[in-house]
């Protein structure tokens, strides 16, 4: 009986993502800085974006936000230590929202007097030496809060806690969220296939091919999850930041035109603008072969060409 009890405790500890020793370990604070970069420069707020897309156009940042979850630091042995996120308006459960627009919604680049809304993730980890970081871009289906299971992705933004309470980041697909939202304004209006024009070229990533209505208590299941893990094996939180490179994201996309579907890429399986965007992110838009069933999964585990580690720049947007 004693052996069985120990086995049960060990199993529960493993399932919780932490060991019994780690649970009582001394904690140390950690802050992970995130940044947008374009053409080799840090950008944000209403910054101009040079040489963007296949046409190397001078565009302007319209909006940029994304959710990250399941953030971990990596030690020299390759073991992962989950970051216990500080709970605030930007972080809930094991989820955080990064927002690179300024609080005033203006058109000026970020500065010390006009910082981005939230570009720093904060929390604590067991005391130790760490050499890398890992996180998931996307909102989990659910998480544990105060010992209870709570719905995250498929929940009403009208009643959800911050930062899940933002209408702009909500899909109309079974109550899911936009995991990543990047919008840019090219120098001239976007020419659509039907002859009309649009002001903004958009990238909205979220789960699709979902079934079930959470509003009526149904369990939602999505055929294409479209979450992806970013592993940076060489990362020092004290001297480096996580860069999302817009040049890489839009490299093979012509942001001056839209050939069909939503303007830009909104995760549509038949949207002609989505293959290049999904390739840059490191995701399979559709199955790689008949019967592969890998649509919505990561092409290579832990790898996304749009994310990298870079030195902390002089300007890092402060949290408001």
Image: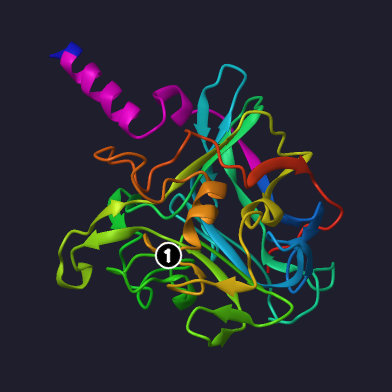
Image coordinates for residue 72, horizontal then vertical, percent: 53, 37
* Callout 1 crowding tier (Cα within 10 Å): few <14, some 14–19, many ≥20: some
Image coordinates for residue 221, horizontal then vertical, percent: 22, 55
Q: Is residue 96 left or right of residue 111?
A: left
Is 272 drawn above or below residue 156 in the view shown? above
Q: Report the front residue among 118 and 100.
A: 100
User: Which of the 4 image quadrants contains residue 211?
Assistant: bottom left
Q: Mark 1 points at which residue?
A: 271
Which quadrant of the rendered structure holds the C terminus?
bottom right
Q: What element carries label 1?
A: loop
Image coordinates for residue 59, horizontal then vertical, percent: 74, 71
Determine the residue located farthest toward the right in the rendered image. 314
Which quadrant of the rendered structure holds the N terminus?
top left
Is 259 drawn above or below residue 30 in the view shown? below
Q: Where does the magenta region start and end? A: 4-30
Q: Report the front residue among 36 and 296.
A: 296
Determine the residue located farthest toward the left in the rendered image. 1
User: Which of the 4 image quadrants contains residue 30?
Assistant: top right
Q: Which residue is drawn at 63% across and 68% down?
A: 255
In the image, residue 29 lies in the stretch drawn in magenta:
yes
In the image, residue 256 lies in the stretch drawn in magenta:
no
């Amino acid at each position: 009986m004693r052996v069985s009890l120990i086995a049960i405790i060990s199993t529960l500890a493993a399932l919780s993502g932490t060991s019994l020793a780690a649970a009582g370990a001394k904690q140390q604070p950690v802050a992970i800085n995130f940044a947008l970069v374009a053409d080799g420069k840090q950008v944000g707020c209403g910054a101009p974006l040079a040489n963007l897309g296949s046409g190397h156009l001078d565009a302007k940042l319209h909006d940029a936000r994304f959710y990250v979850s399941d953030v971990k630091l990596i030690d020299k042995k390759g073991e992962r230590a989950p970051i216990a996120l500080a709970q605030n308006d930007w972080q809930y459960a094991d989820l955080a929202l990064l927002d690179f627009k300024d609080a005033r919604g203006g058109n000026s680049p970020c500065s010390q007097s006009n910082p981005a809304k939230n570009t720093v993730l904060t929390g604590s980890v067991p005391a130790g030496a760490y050499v890398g970081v890992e996180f998931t871009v996307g909102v989990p289906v659910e998480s544990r809060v105060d010992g209870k299971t709570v719905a995250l992705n498929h929940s009403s933004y009208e009643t959800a806690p911050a930062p899940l309470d933002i209408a702009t980041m909500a899909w109309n697909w079974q109550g899911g969220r936009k995991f990543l939202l990047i919008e840019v304004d090219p120098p001239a209006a976007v020419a659509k296939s039907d002859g009309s024009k649009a002001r903004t070229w958009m990238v909205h990533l979220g789960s699709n091919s979902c079934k079930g209505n959470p509003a009526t208590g149904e369990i939602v299941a999505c055929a294409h999850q479209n979450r992806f893990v970013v592993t940076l094996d060489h990362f020092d939180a004290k001297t480096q930041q996580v860069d999302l490179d817009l040049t890489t994201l839009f490299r093979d996309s012509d942001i001056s035109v839209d050939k069909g579907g939503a303007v830009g890429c909104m995760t549509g399986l038949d949207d002609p603008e989505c293959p290049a965007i999904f390739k840059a992110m490191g995701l399979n838009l559709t199955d790689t072969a008949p019967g592969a069933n890998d649509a919505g999964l990561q092409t290579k585990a832990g790898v996304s060409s749009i994310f990298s580690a870079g030195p902390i720049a002089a300007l890092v947007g402060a949290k408001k």
